[in-house]
Image (cartoon, rainbow, N blue to C red):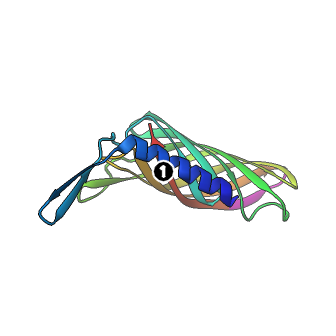
């Protein structure tokens, strides 16, 4: 599990270093680094979600204030001592420009979606309500986000759970 995470992080770092190609300027005692990359406004993003569950995330913008979010992850606290793989899909509605601090803007969001858990006890299917806050960088194609959600499993039995964590996506 640690090897896969390290490999994905190394691939992401290599991709970003190839894409960014910074221009460093030194004047007096001030150092300014300009990235030739583009802002994080690409319509798609792929990255890592670290928390509960931990795994891969993919996002596709539908408009300025809505997107589809998908996760394929493993639940570290799930299952009966064995494995638990989660698949999540959400429609999320955002409020761009609602929280602005100095020069950067945080975007709160909430949504609704579905969750499927495949574990050593069988398959569980349910609905979820995620919410959080997102920040897309202006000078590099990255997005950071915090997300928490309530998961309500409906099949094969009623159960309530939660999920949440920190994510990073490369925007393209």
From the image, tell me which residue sits under label 1: 13
> For the point 25% across and 53% down, which residue is it?
33
The location of residue 60, given as percent across then percent down, is 50, 36
Query: Is residue 15 highlighted in magenta?
Result: no
Specify the quadrant that holds the N terminus. bottom right
Residue beneath the point at 41% across and 36% down: 42
Q: Looking at the image, how many numbered discs can be counted on the residues?
A: 1
**Magenta residues?**
156-161
Decide: is 127 above or below 77: above
Of residue 81 and residue 15, the one placed in the foreground of this image is: 15
Tell which of 48 and 20 is nearer to you. 20
Which secondary structure lies at badge 1?
A: helix
Tell me where residue 68 appears, x and y as whole percent. 54, 39
Looking at the picture, does residue 98 appear above or below residue 19? below
Query: Most extreme residue toward the left, as rendered?
Result: 28
Kindly identify the residue that appears in the image at 48 percent across and 47 percent down.
Answer: 14
Category of crowding for the residue at label 1, using alpha-carbon neighbours closer than 10 angstroms: few (below 14), some (14–19), many (at least 20)? few
- Residue at 66 percent across and 53 percent down: it is 4
Q: Is residue 115 visible?
A: yes
Q: In which quarter of the image is the C terminus?
A: top left
- As displayed, is residue 82 above or below residue 11? below
Measured from the top left, where is residue 131 in percent x and y?
Answer: 52, 54
Left or right of 10: which side holds 85? Answer: right
Q: Is any part of residue 40 visible from this angle? A: no
């Amino acid at each position: 599990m640690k090897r896969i995470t390290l490999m994905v992080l190394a691939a992401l770092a290599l991709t970003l270093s190839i894409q960014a190609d910074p221009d460093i300027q030194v004047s007096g005692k001030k150092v300014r680094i300009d990235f030739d990359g583009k802002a994080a406004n690409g319509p798609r993003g792929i990255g890592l979600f670290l928390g509960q569950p931990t795994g891969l995330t993919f996002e596709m913008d539908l408009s300025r204030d809505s997107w589809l979010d998908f996760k394929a992850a493993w639940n570290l606290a799930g299952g009966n001592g064995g494995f638990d793989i989660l698949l999540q899909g959400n429609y999320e509605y955002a409020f761009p420009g609602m929280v602005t601090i100095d020069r950067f803007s945080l975007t709160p969001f909430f949504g609704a979606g579905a969750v499927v858990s495949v574990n050593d006890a069988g398959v569980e299917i349910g609905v979820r309500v995620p919410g959080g806050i997102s920040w897309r960088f202006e000078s590099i194609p990255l997005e950071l986000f915090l997300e928490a959600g309530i998961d309500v499993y409906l099949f094969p039995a009623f159960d309530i759970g939660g999920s949440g964590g920190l994510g990073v996506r490369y925007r393209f």
